[in-house]
Image (cartoon, helix red, strand yellow):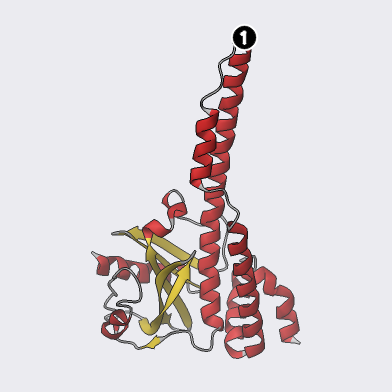
Amino acid sequence: MACEAWKEKLGSYLDGELPDSEGRAFDAHARTCPACASDALARLQLKRNVQVAGRQFTPSAEFRNRIQRQMAAPRRSTFRWAWVTGAAALALLLIAFGLSYRNQQQLRSQAIFTEIADLHVATLASASPVDVVSTDRHTVKPWFAGKIPFTFDLPDLGNSDFSLLGGRMTYLDHAPGAHLIYQVRKHRISVFIFPEDSLPALRQTSTPLKKLSFNMETWNHSGLRYFVISDAGPGDIDSLARLFKSAAQ
């Protein structure tokens, strides 16, 4: 009966529309219910496939630039009024293109945050969340050598409440990256690392426009983009983020 109730809310959960308390409750339920975990993973994969298909028909920057160059060279007219009208129309069109491009960038940045949340959910629902299982950062970090086109540093957890569970390769918008799994008390935290130049939409927007079911912190450093996401409290997210920032200095 409980599973039937969760199935009705699964769509809202994957879209990040559930209250925080219900989102955490489903996370706990999915860890002990293979049926709900499998259903969540299947819907998540379908959702990501639809997102990828939709982006295949997005006009490229080169196409937009070519159209703008063509519009910026209006034909000469013997009538001044026609020239003025054409210039005004051109200005309006350029403004429209600019607003459209900005909206597309905002939508793309929001899609990235949603995909990060989806990757985190998929990990929680997976029977094998990590490919390299180790609590030793000196074992996990070398495992990524040759698998991703960059290197990174893992923090010394010292006397913190965090423990490293392992890592795996992952992809975001076809770009390879690292996915580290940590635990603090009963919460699992995902840390994603990708090349900054593979995510140009985040250069102007670094915070989600839409409230997610998880707490998230993101930043860039030395050409890399970091994401820390979990249902753990904001304080835990901030503490782990600060450990990573110190390790990268």
Seen at 56% across and 32% down, the residue is: 95
Observer-nearest of 10 and 56:
56
Describe the element under mark 1 as helix, strand or loop. loop
Tell me if 221 is positioned left or right of 110 in this view. Answer: left
Looking at the image, the residue that sits furthest to the top is: 79
Rendering coords of residue 189 (x, y %): 45, 76
- Residue 204 coordinates in the image, percent (x, y): 44, 48
Q: Foreground residue, 92 or 135? A: 92
Residue 235 visible in the picture: no
Above or below residue 118? Residue 84 is above
Q: Residues within 10 Å of mark 1 (few under 14, many from 20)?
A: few
Question: What is the total number of numbered labels drawn onto the structure image?
Answer: 1
Along the line of sight, the residue nearer the viewer: 129 or 151? 151
- Residue 100 seen: yes
| Side (left or right) of 170 relative to 243 | right
**Image check: 242 left or right of 96?**
left
Residue placed at 46% from the left, 51% from the top?
A: 205
Which residue is labeled 1 in the image?
Answer: 79
Q: Quadrant of the N terminus?
A: bottom right
Q: Given the image, on which type of amino acid does mark 1 rest?
A: Phe
Figure quadrant of the C terminus = bottom left
State whether residue 223 is above or below residue 244. above
